Image (cartoon, rainbow, N blue to C red):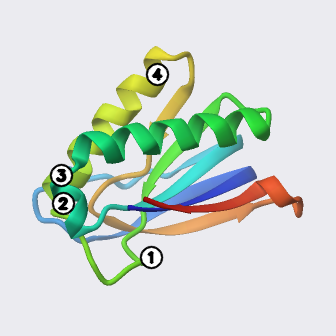
Amino acid sequence: MKLLMIYCEKFGYQPRMKTLDDAPDISEGTEFNNALVGFIQLEARDEENSGYVETKLIKNLKWAARKNETNTIVLHSFAHLSESKASPELTKTIFDSAEKRLDDSGYEVSQTPFGYFLDLDLRAPGHPLARLFKEF
């Protein structure tokens, strides 16, 4: 898994192009303030260790959210960090499970629409913990 975390003073999206036929039809965008956005790519090798990968994802997101003093986390599927990709089914399953576990821990969690290319609008401050990358 590759995980790029960016703390955003403002993060918004607008669905632009549907990429998965079975994705629900979504036309409305959303905006968040003071949110940690996880740009997440699951890789083929993650299929064998999905429980480990999910736990590492959650721990890293919680840590970065605390360091950036936010309780809002946005999960964004970002299949541009590696040439290796896990199946869409596994990716969506891990996203849904991570959202529930983070929500149960008291975080306000959202996902960007899965199976879409999105127009993104973000504003991120220039401090060291506002941009973090992890690979596991």
| Residue found 23% across the figure and 71% down from its top | 19
| Residue found 38% across the figure and 79% down from its top | 82
Check disc 2 and report the residue beneath it: 88
Check disc 4 and report the residue beneath it: 103
How many C-alpha atoms fall within 10 Å of the one at disc 3: few (<14), some, or many (≥20)?
some
**First along the sequence among labels 4 and 1:** 1
Residue 50 in the image, given as x and y percentages of width and height: 23, 47
Q: Determine the secondary structure under disc 2.
A: helix
| Residue found 52% across the figure and 36% down from its top | 59
Q: Amino acid at mark 1?
A: Leu
Residue 119 in the image, given as x and y percentages of width and height: 52, 70
Check disc 3 and report the residue beneath it: 90
Q: Quadrant of the N terminus?
A: bottom left
CB within 8 Å, label 3 to label 1: no
Name the one closer to the observer, 61 or 103. Answer: 61
Q: Determine the secondary structure under disc 1.
A: loop
Q: Amino acid at mark 3?
A: Leu
**First along the sequence among labels 1 and 2:** 1
Q: CA distance from mark 2 to mark 3?
A: 6 Å
Decide if residue 23 is in sight here: no
